[in-house]
Image (spheres, rainbow, N blue to C red):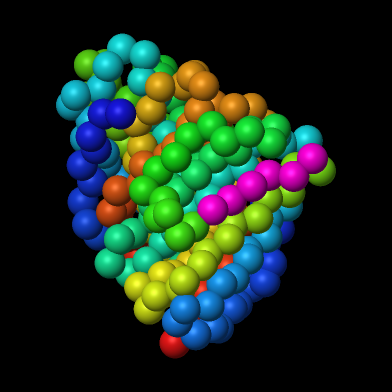
Amino acid sequence: DAKTTQPTSMDCAEGRAANLPCNHSTISGNEYVYWYRQIHSQGPQYIIHGLKNNETNEMASLIITEDRKSSTLILPHATLRDTAVYYCIVRFPTGTASKLTFGTGTRLQVTL
Amino acid sequence: DSGVTQTPKHLITATGQRVTLRCSPRSGDLSVYWYQQSLDQGLQFLIQYYNGEERAKGNILERFSAQQFPDLHSELNLSSLELGDSALYFCASSATVADNEQFFGPGTRLTVL
């Protein structure tokens, strides 16, 4: 799995967009970018994933650069409930098993 | 609510003891994963089962073992417990064997005194 680098922490005002960057410069052609978040001591929650095109779902948008060496998770209107640790994970989509490797992630603090 | 259930929610025990953590995956999911989250190690993958068979192993200690039963629920057995085993233990499930979209349970907080 390609290594990822994320800022340790970020702040965001409630109602504003939260843009969380992830660097994955060693990503290979078939690896996907996955985002999870963990709200304090709860189980991690899958958010979104993508290969090369931008993706959007009801929770967030994922923007992947054209060279695929970095990506940004966007929470369009952050709320206090979005305060969590956000993990960017790069993995191949198929195989005979799956074991997610969580790094240290970005601690997002949403404030009033 | 992810649909994954874990019991018990909290467990307090003494060093040297043995405990069993239980996980019921989402309806229809065949894969079960176990993760450990401690303060100093972060979230670490332990082991994966798919339809009753072990599929992947992480840094799981020999004192730990797991199994998945025919009804697809899974149990993680931790024995000869040490203080350092105190952690949150999460179970996750997914539909297929190589799903990177996994659904996590609420966790079991184990405290070893």
* Span of residues in magenta: B65-70
Q: Is residue A111 above or below residue B70?
A: below
Q: Residue at x 64, y 27 (%)?
A: B96
Tell me where residue B49 appears, x and y as whole percent.
60, 38
| Residue A53 falls in image quadrant | top left
Q: Nearer the viewer, residue B73 or B69?
A: B69
Q: Is residue A32 visible?
A: yes
Tell me where residue B41 appears, x and y as whole percent.
30, 61
Q: Nearer the viewer, residue B16 or B23?
A: B16
Q: Quadrant of the N terminus of chain B?
A: bottom right
Could you tell me what secondary structure mostly forms the magenta stretch?
strand
Q: Residue at x 59, y 71 (%)?
A: B19
Q: Is residue B66 magenta?
A: yes
Q: Residue at x 36, y 20 (%)?
A: A31
**B74 left or right of A14 in image:** right
Q: Is residue B24 magenta?
A: no
**B95 left or right of B107 in image:** right
